């Protein structure tokens, strides 16, 4: 968008323009500090020794930097009687998140395509009903879902967790794609139909290639939601399929034992690395994807 | 046959998802409604007993607190996060050289779960360890920031942490909106000598109405589901001063073995959601059909 | 991908093993995940393995078992219950009533549990006359811990009445020491509350109030006195107590910032881990008043399919109550054995005191279940009481109001 301050600047004195710029930057930096504060506390704590945490200032810089807590958290912290750190659970999370994100994104794309471009009677009602599904508090579905998974024979398994995440991701993925596709002129589909292209053909060769920005948005959203999920992870897993958030909770939230805050913090950062990575790397595309239409209600 | 198939492909594609939602959302809501009428304790039972759970619910002072907190929390969280998100987006839209880095910093909290950041926030907000202690150590002995441990104020620390987590996301939405406003109109306005702030309030912000709506929906969804946040930050305390309906329900269902009570609180929560979402859906879909 | 394949093969293995007996195996759901606790459970796992068993660990920490209970409900509803679950108090009977617990009477009878366990503790392990759970340890809840140096410097003895405690606290406050280290979490508020209640109501009054839920006792003037004392004690706590973890409160006693802490004997583990010696660096005593509040950890056995799993449960139950595990586990955890015939030579003076007091109160009828730790009441009722206790402690509510609220909340929770 337009650079307002620059054009305005013509009419302003040079000095007040510079002052304004300074004010602007200091505001931005101030807010950046606010957002970085918890991360700062976490990182510095993870680099301290336990003695220093006990005796020193919690939000001061470490006097001596040590990476022991990090290696403990990754491979030898106790999450029960097994002391293998968060590593095995980390892979469980990967095995859950990747298929669940892929499937829910694909289904969301198809659904959005139907709702936006292949209107039929009742399509809007179906869409509203699906959208409402975004808002259901997950605590509500835990018990009936447990029963259902038991009947389906996938209770406590990774496919079971993937299934749950796909179901409760559908509302949002459909919403994202629908809002994106609705801004694509209906004439495009009509013309393609005249040319004899079918439903899947049009989706595959016209809509999908246009969809990169919204796919990025959806994948980021879904990946964050699924990776950070604790409630489903703790309820629908069993020994051997617990995701990393459950392991993290086991390390951080033990009630009657000695707390190793440096290991807690290191484990927390490790558990958060994939989502952080996704936001840092794909953040640019995220804004672009949103700009491309998903927010145009 | 193939013609029928061709005609109905869209419906067939949508059908599995729709059926899944019907069963796993609406079926489960119906299940919850049923259970809320029973005296289920540890595990669900199905003999209907009437509205006893709702009576118990409204007799419970803790539920009152939870519901009040939802309104305070929801209102402040949504308003401030939107306002802050908008301001940050406008500030960032002024040709900032390091925009990419700053944007990432604003956005990253959304990537973290509160299980991860809860402990850090607890320390920062704790008067004896965090900000208060720090400022006092600089020589301002009278500085007080004890919201976390003050039952009257503790809910505002939850608001603060929630804003920290989500305002960056709102900023991203608004930034995207600003980038898609037609530059020609703005240039024309500037040529006419309209001051910058007027350009924003009169032209740009009104044109972003759909984004306000999207942001509102995302934020209210987060507000209603806020759970990890409270558990990690205050554990519902001091006392139960920061309980929210989601934490109330969880406590009833899973630590108290009072599933009937949990189900009735869930139904009230669903009604609140309904009251917020249905008007949105109505306006949204009517405008599209029109 | 490897884990996925492993998961798939192991579920096949489970299917197959219902046909062929593959040695005892047990999946154990528990919330002992921190260093010392986990080490204690590992002792059990090693013994289990030495007897040919296969242990599958299913730890879920958080909220004193809340998260574990969430997982347990989901597992039971999906028809996939773990073999053994860390459960305690009336929750065991509650689960039994849902018809999901297994009967381990054969093990209990073969090993004479009725002889070696105190009667009131054995009672918690029985469901309608059959044995359905195995006790691991006895934690005493009504402990008061103190920093020996701080007490000596201020000329204070361990208090034996609440008035003495208040006098000591005033003195300490005047000397600039925080009298009571406390963490403002609901369960910690409840822990202090029940220690005070035991002292003021006496063992009989405590039983009437928190086991029988007798309305007259709940609304009595004595109960008002309990809340009055809680209000007084609120003044002895520092300003930043809200949300503080109990172990941080213990640390305050250790480093002399605070003088006393009222907390169960798991606090001892913190003192010992920091290299402090009982009797020298820190003192332990029962809170003012008669009686003994116990918090017994136990494993309940859930009904499972398959001979190997049932064999696993029986082996596990036998080992849990076996003398060796009872000794090693409790040495690690700071509690005392549930069995009365375990020699206490290796235990410290606090544990020995605890054990003697338990025997004496068991004879005198003042061995009582802890309400704050879920031993006395079902979740709905104990939760309702805790709501009032914590609301009172964290506000300026009067004792009259609190007593009325208490009676209302208990009635509403039925």
Image (cartoon, grey):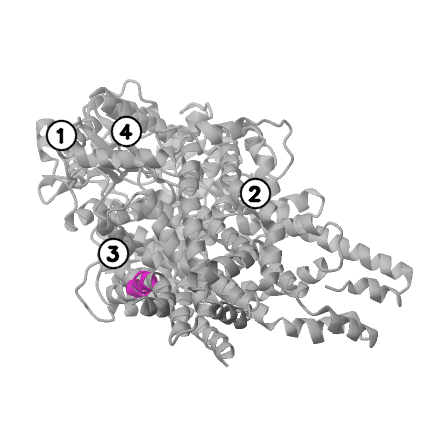
- A164 lies left or right of C317: right
- C209 lies left or right of A126: left
**Discs 4, 1 touching: Cβ within 8 Å:** no
Front label number (4 vs 1): 1
Q: Distance between the residues labelled 4 and 2?
A: 48 Å
Q: Nearer the viewer, residue C300 or B153?
A: C300
Q: How crowded is mark 1: few (under 14 residues within 10 Å), some or many (20 or more)?
A: few
Q: Residue at x 58, y 67 (%)?
A: B79
**Discs 1, 2 touching: Cβ within 8 Å:** no
Front label number (4 vs 3): 4
Q: Determine if the magenta segment contains residue B22.
A: yes
**Magenta segment:** B18-29
Q: Name the residue under label 1.
A: C20
Q: Distance between the residues labelled 1 and 2?
A: 48 Å
Q: Are marks 2 and 3 on the same chain?
A: no
Task: Compare marks 4 and 3 and give the one earlier in the sequence.
Answer: 3
Q: Is mark 4 on a helix, strand or loop?
A: loop
Q: Which residue is drawn at 71% across and 54% down?
A: A28
Q: Are marks 1 and 3 on the same chain?
A: yes
Task: Compare marks 1 and 3 and give the one earlier in the sequence.
Answer: 1
Q: Where in the figure is residue A209, as x and y percent of width and height? A: 54, 56
**Discs 2, 3 touching: Cβ within 8 Å:** no
Q: Name the residue under label 2.
A: A277
Q: Which residue lies furthest to the bottom in this view?
A: B290
Q: Mark 3 points at which residue?
A: C217
């Amino acid at each position: 968008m337009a650079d307002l301050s620059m054009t305005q600047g013509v009419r302003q004195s040079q000095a007040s323009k510079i002052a304004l710029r300074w004010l602007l930057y200091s505001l931005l930096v101030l807010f950046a500090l606010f957002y970085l504060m918890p991360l700062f506390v976490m990182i510095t704590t993870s680099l301290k020794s336990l003695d220093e945490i006990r005796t020193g200032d919690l939000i001061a810089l470490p006097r001596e930097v040590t990476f022991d807590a990090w290696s403990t958290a990754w491979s030898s912290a106790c999450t029960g009687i097994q002391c293998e750190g968060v590593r095995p659970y980390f892979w469980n999370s990967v095995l859950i998140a990747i298929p669940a994100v892929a499937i829910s994104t694909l289904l969301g794309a198809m659904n959005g395509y139907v709702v936006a471009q292949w209107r039929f009677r009742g399509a809007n009602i179906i869409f509203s009903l699906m959208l409402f599904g975004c808002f259901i508090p997950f605590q509500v579905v835990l018990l009936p879902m447990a029963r259902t998974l038991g009947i389906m024979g996938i209770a406590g398994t990774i496919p079971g967790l993937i299934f749950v995440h796909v179901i409760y991701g559908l509302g949002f993925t459909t919403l994202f794609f629908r809002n994106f596709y609705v801004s694509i002129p209906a004439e495009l589909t009509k013309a393609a139909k005249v040319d004899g292209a079918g439903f899947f053909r049009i989706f595959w060769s016209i809509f999908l290639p246009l969809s990169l920005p919204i796919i990025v948005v959806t994948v980021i959203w879904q990946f964050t939601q699924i990776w950070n999920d604790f409630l489903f992870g703790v309820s629908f897993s069993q020994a051997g399929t617990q995701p990393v958030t459950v392991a993290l909770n086991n390390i951080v939230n033990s009630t009657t034992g000695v707390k190793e805050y440096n290991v807690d913090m290191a484990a927390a950062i490790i558990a958060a690395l994939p989502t952080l990575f996704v936001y840092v790397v794909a953040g640019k595309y995220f804004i672009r994807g949103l700009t491309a239409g998903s927010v145009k209600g | 046959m193939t013609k029928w198939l061709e005609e109905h492909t869209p419906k067939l594609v949508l059908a599995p998802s729709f059926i899944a939602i019907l069963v796993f959302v609406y079926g489960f809501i119906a299940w919850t409604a049923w259970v809320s009428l029973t005296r289920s304790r540890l595990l669900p039972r199905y003999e209907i007993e009437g509205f006893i759970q709702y009576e118990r619910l409204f007799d419970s002072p803790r539920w009152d607190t939870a519901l009040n907190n939802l309104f305070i929390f929801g209102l402040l969280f949504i308003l401030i996060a939107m306002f802050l998100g908008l301001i940050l987006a406008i500030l960032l839209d002024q040709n900032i050289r390091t925009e990419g880095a700053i944007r990432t910093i604003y956005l990253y909290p959304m990537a973290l779960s509160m299980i991860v950041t809860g402990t850090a926030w607890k320390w920062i907000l704790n008067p004896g360890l965090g900000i208060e202690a720090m400022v006092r150590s600089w020589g301002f002995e009278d500085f007080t920031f004890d919201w976390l441990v003050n039952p009257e104020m503790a809910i505002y620390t939850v608001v603060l942490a929630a804003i920290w987590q989500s305002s960056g996301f709102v900023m991203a939405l608004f930034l995207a909106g600003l980038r898609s406003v037609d530059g020609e109109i703005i240039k024309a306005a500037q040529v006419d000598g309209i001051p910058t702030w007027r350009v924003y309030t009169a032209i740009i912000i009104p044109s972003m109405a759909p984004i306000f709506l999207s942001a509102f929906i995302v934020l209210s969804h987060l507000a209603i589901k806020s759970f990890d946040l409270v558990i990690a930050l205050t554990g519902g305390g001091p006392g139960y001063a920061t309980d929210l309906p989601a934490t109330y329900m969880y406590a009833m269902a899973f630590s108290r073995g009072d599933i009937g009570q949990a189900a009735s609180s869930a139904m009230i929560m669903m009604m609140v959601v309904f009251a917020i979402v249905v008007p949105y859906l109505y306006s949204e879909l009517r405008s599209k059909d029109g | 991908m490897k884990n996925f394949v492993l998961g798939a093969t192991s579920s096949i293995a489970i299917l197959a093993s219902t046909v062929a007996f593959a040695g005892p195996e047990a999946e154990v759901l528990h919330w002992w995940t921190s260093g010392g606790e986990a080490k204690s459970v590992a002792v059990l796992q090693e013994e289990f393995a030495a007897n040919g068993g296969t242990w599958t660990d299913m730890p879920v920490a958080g909220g004193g078992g809340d998260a574990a209970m969430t997982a347990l409900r989901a597992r039971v509803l999906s028809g996939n219950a773990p073999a053994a679950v860390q459960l305690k108090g009336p929750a065991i009977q509650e689960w039994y009533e849902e018809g999901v617990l297994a009967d381990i009477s054969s093990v209990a009878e073969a090993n004479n549990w009725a002889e070696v366990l105190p009667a009131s503790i054995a009672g918690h392990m029985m469901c309608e006359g059959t044995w359905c759970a195995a006790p691991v340890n006895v934690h005493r809840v009504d402990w008061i811990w103190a920093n020996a140096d701080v007490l000596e410097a201020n000329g204070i003895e361990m208090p034996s009445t609440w008035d003495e405690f208040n006098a000591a606290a005033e003195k300490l406050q005047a000397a600039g020491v925080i009298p009571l280290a406390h963490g403002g979490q609901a369960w910690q508020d409840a822990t202090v509350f029940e220690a005070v209640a035991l002292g003021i109501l006496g063992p009989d009054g405590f039983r009437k109030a928190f086991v029988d839920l007798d309305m007259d006792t709940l609304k009595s003037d004595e109960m008002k006195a309990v809340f009055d004392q809680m209000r007084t004690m609120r003044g002895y706590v520092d300003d930043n107590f809200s949300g503080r973890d109990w172990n941080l409160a213990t640390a305050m006693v250790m480093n002399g910032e605070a003088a006393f802490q009222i907390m169960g004997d798991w606090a001892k583990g913190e003192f010992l881990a920091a290299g402090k010696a009982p009797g020298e660096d820190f003192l332990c005593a029962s809170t003012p008043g008669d009686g003994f509040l116990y918090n017994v950890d136990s494993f309940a056995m859930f009904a499972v399919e398959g001979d190997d799993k049932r064999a696993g449960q029986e082996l596990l139950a036998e080992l849990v109550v076996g003398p060796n595990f009872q000794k090693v586990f409790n040495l690690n955890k700071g509690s005392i054995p549930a069995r009365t015939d375990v020699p206490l030579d290796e235990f410290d003076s606090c544990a020995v005191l605890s054990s003697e007091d338990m025997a004496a109160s068991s004879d005198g009828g003042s061995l009582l279940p802890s309400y704050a730790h879920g031993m006395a009441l079902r979740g709905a009722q104990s939760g309702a009481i805790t709501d009032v206790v914590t609301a009172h402690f964290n506000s300026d509510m009067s004792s009259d109001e609190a007593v009325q609220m208490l009676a209302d909340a208990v009635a509403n929770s039925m």
